Image (cartoon, helix red, strand yellow):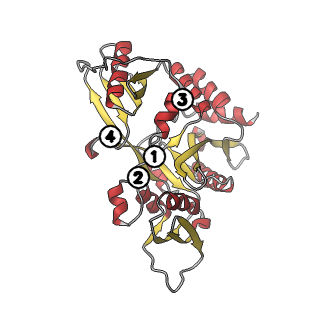
Amino acid sequence: MNKKEEYRKIYTSSFSDTPEWASWFVDSVCSDDDIILGYGPEGTPVSGMAALPYRFAPLNPATEEALQAVYLAGVATLPKARGRGAMSALMRDALRLARMREIDVCTLIPAGRRLFFFYDKFGFTTVFYATEERYTSVHDFIPADDARYPEPDFEIFHNLEKGRPYTVCHSEKDFKNILTDARLSRGHVVTAVCGSGSAMAFANPMSDGTTYVSALLSNSEEAAESALSRLKEITGETSFLVMRDPDSGTKATLRARGMIRLLNVGRVLSSLAACSPDTTATIRVRDHLLTENDGIYRIKDGYCEKAASIAHHDRITLDVTVDVLARILFNTPRLGDVFNLPATRPAMYLMLD
């Protein structure tokens, strides 16, 4: 049995997707290199996941390069092997492999609430949030007078995505996968353009009849309202659950969406230093799993250098574990100001979760 067939067996034993969707995901979305398998005592695969490649902004202004990311999808274990540490062993192997492949950060969206605590053990921390908005079936969305609704287009999508800092970015191939996912899930993708603004809404029906808008990307409220208006024309008189940018609402409406794990602390801090050349800090980092990250990082004049030990003139401004560092860097600017470090909430959406 080849690698994809082994993973398909593990995947279908754990998730209730339709056979058509599962086959598409394993055969078309995942490559052999993306699939990571874990083996039991008998030497046969008992656990698996797909480590899908993405780019993670911000761009380093000196090199115009984004950080490299992987997104862990379809994390699963055969029922007979659960509760025996198979996934813990696979997770440790996957993180070390990603580090060896020069990946900078690892991201994921837990399949259930309790799994947030499971991933905590491996240095992941919750940094991806979305603002939740709810609308009843009698709510009217008012479109702009000049609104038009072109077919879903990667260029519009790409411009909306790159307009927001600290985002897990999709390629044109990823965008095509998103459209296929919507089709297989009986969903809808609506594009609205009005004036100089644009918006895209990605929606699926829920079992209770609610229209779930898993992502609403926009650069103007007029365009966002127009996209939702068009979506309501298509779906009918349903209630709406809309997930938007984490900076678009109040703290009371924030919902945890995903987690991040720093794999290469030096590259992450170098990118952040290049984007914030006025930042000066000396940070000691401890990583219980990837000890390559252990050390002292000095940030100054747009650069970051790593030292094995503290110099006599050093004053440690931050002494943290790798997960706490991520929690500080990828948070609100208000928290970053406390530590004199740049901080911004990141965004992650449309990850085929």
Which mark identifies residue 344? 2
Which circle, 3 or 4, is nearer the viewer? 3
* Residue in the foreground of this view, choosing between 11 and 34: 34
Q: Earlier in the sequence, mark 3 or mark 2?
A: 3
Q: Is residue 273 left or right of residue 97?
A: left
Which circle, 4 or 1, is nearer the viewer? 1
Q: Is residue 132 above or below residue 303?
A: above
Q: CA distance from mark 4 to mark 2?
A: 13 Å
Kindly check if marks 4 and 1 are in contact, taking CB atoms under 8 A apart as contact.
no
Kindly check if marks 4 and 2 are in contact, taking CB atoms under 8 A apart as contact.
no
Query: Disc 1 designates what residue?
Result: 165
Q: Earlier in the sequence, mark 4 or mark 1?
A: 1
Q: CA distance from mark 2 to mark 1?
A: 8 Å
Q: Earlier in the sequence, mark 3 or mark 4?
A: 3
* Residue in the foreground of this view, choosing between 135 and 176: 176
Q: Earlier in the sequence, mark 2 or mark 1?
A: 1
Query: Disc 3 designates what residue?
Result: 155
Name which residue type carries label 3: Glu
Instruction: Tell me the element at label 1.
Output: loop
Name which residue type carries label 4: Ser
Q: Residues within 10 Å of mark 2 (few under 14, many from 20)?
A: some
Kindly check if marks 2 and 1 are in contact, taking CB atoms under 8 A apart as contact.
yes
Query: Disc 4 designates what residue?
Result: 248
